[in-house]
Amino acid sequence: MDDLRGTAGTRVTAGAAAVAVVAAGLGVRALAGGAVAKYAGDGLYTVLLYALVVAVAPRVRPVRAGLVAAALSWAVELFQLTGVPDGLGRRSTLARLVLGSTFNPPDLLWYLVGAALAALLHTALLRTPLLRGAGRPAPSGSGRPRA
């Protein structure tokens, strides 16, 4: 059986996390408004990208996954400066959801918050004995058996 660092189990977990993040995003939009919904959505957008990064590269380390997710979020946000996402979003709801429409500098901060929180949760899960695999000891520093 794969542990959380394996591939199949990690992909399933990341896929489930992606579905949960989308549900959380829809829930925030339904229950909150204004800045709370906006910035929670920004953070969750990056958490979703984080989950997708882990699904594609299941052995990725949390810090690297966070950096990739944040970089992708920033790239999309900066792409909004061109006006292309706004034009696409006027024709497609999916494009508007994925690319947004207008550049907003505070979004860049909230993307970092989402990436950091996802990396912290991922790190905590990797350290959870139950998720490392039944009967498997925690990794030791030297890799040699103790005498």
Image: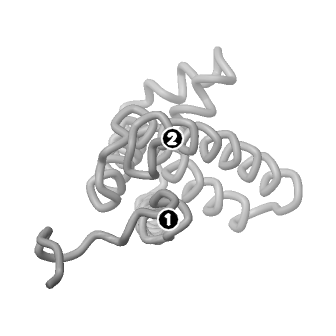
Which numbered tag is attached to residue 71?
none
- What residue sits 38% from the left and 50% below the top? 5
Mark 2 surroundings: few (<14), some (14-19) or many (≥20) residues within 10 A: some
Q: Residue furthest top?
A: 91
Mark 1 surroundings: few (<14), some (14-19) or many (≥20) residues within 10 A: some
With respect to residue 24, does 95 lie above or below?
Answer: above
Q: Residue furthest front?
A: 147
In three-dimensional space, the C-alpha distance between marks 2 and 1, rounded to whole angstroms, equals 13 Å
Q: Position of residue 131 (x, y in %)?
A: 52, 60
From the image, tell me which residue sits under label 1: 125
Instruction: Name the image quarter holding residue 7.
Output: top left
Q: Position of residue 121 (x, y in %)?
A: 50, 67
Amino acid on which the number 1 mark rests in the picture: Leu
Instruction: Name the image quarter holding residue 77.
Output: top left
From the image, tell me which residue sits under label 2: 9
Q: Position of residue 44 (x, y in %)?
A: 59, 54
Amino acid on which the number 2 mark rests in the picture: Gly
Q: Is residue 100 left or right of residue 25?
A: left
